[in-house]
Image: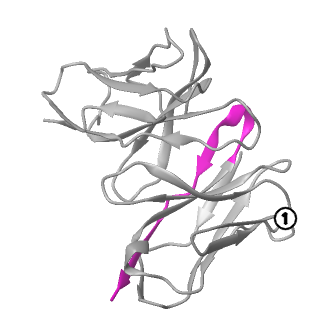
Amino acid sequence: DGGITQSPKYLFRKEGQNVTLSCEQNLNHDAMYWYRQDPGQGLRLIYYSQIVNDFQKGDIAEGYSVSREKKESFPLTVTSAQKNPTAFYLCASSRMVASYEQYFGPGTRLTVT
Amino acid sequence: GDSVTQMEGPVTLSEEAFLTINCTYTATGYPSLFWYVQYPGEGLQLLLKATKADDKGSNKGFEATYRKETTSFHLEKGSVQVSDSAVYFCALETSGSRLTFGEGTQLTVNP
């Protein structure tokens, strides 16, 4: 079955540590996205990539980094510079076609203490 | 810039009640519009979409019509079920296939 996988489902880290969240898709989509979701709020775009080896900052990129070395993979690193890293992180992908919907992974809940 | 405004929640209904969740948008041009649904602890799933004015998107008994004159895309369902309890997000497509989301509306349906 085609889809997006994110791992792990739950992640716990100590403050000051960097942590990398995995996102893999087998939908052959060109574009991939990372969103952050806080309780009772909508989704905010962190980074997105429309093609391999290229990515752009979203609305809240500070304290995060990404890479896009393969079409299938778009890992997100939450660095120690991110002031409030505890959140639910969602990865998505889509074709680069107008009006094409984004497909979402199941999410990773990160807790930093 | 582009933005989406959804009716504030939470919304609580009894089973078989009529549902409306309001969504209005601000955008240049003619963006595609989407409704996504999120069940507890999960990612988002596309519920329906409309790509041009007067289009009606529909799925699983839900409907929404793209109204350019009122810049709205209200979600409706004639008879909700307990299993419809979730958070609903309205979204519009901006440049480069990016989506701008509303803040979401929590729906709880009681038996």
Task: Tell me: residue B102, above or below residue B19.
Answer: above
Task: Tell me: residue A15, above or below residue A55.
Answer: below
Quick check: is B109 in the magenta stretch? yes
Residue furthest toward the front? A1
Q: Residue at x 87, y 69 (%)?
A: B69
Q: Residue at x 35, y 51 (%)?
A: B42
- Residue A105: image location, x then y, percent: 42, 39
Left or right: B72 with respect to B111? right
Q: Residue at x 69, y 70 (%)?
A: B64
Left or right: A39 with respect to A32? left
Q: Which element is circle 1 on?
A: loop
The range drawn in magenta is B93-111
Residue in front for this viewpoint, A56 or A2:
A2
- Residue type, mark 1 in image: Lys
Q: Residue at x 35, y 32 (%)?
A: A6
Subunit ID for the residue under disc 1: B
Quick check: is B43 in the magenta stretch? no
Task: Tell me: residue B93, above or below residue A11.
Answer: below
Total numbered labels: 1
Quarter-of-image position of residue A13: top left
Residue in front for this viewpoint, A96 or A45:
A96
Quarter-of-image position of residue B11: bottom left
Q: Could you tell me which quadrant the C terminus of chain A lies in?
A: top left
- Residue A19: image location, x then y, percent: 25, 21
In the rendered image, which residue does mark 1 sit on? Answer: B68
Q: State the scheme by which the image is colored.
A: one colour
Q: Could you tell me which quadrant the N terminus of chain A lies in?
A: top left
How many residues crowd mark 1 within 10 Å: few (<14), some (14–19), many (20+)?
some
- Residue B15: image location, x then y, percent: 42, 89
- Residue B110: image location, x then y, percent: 34, 86
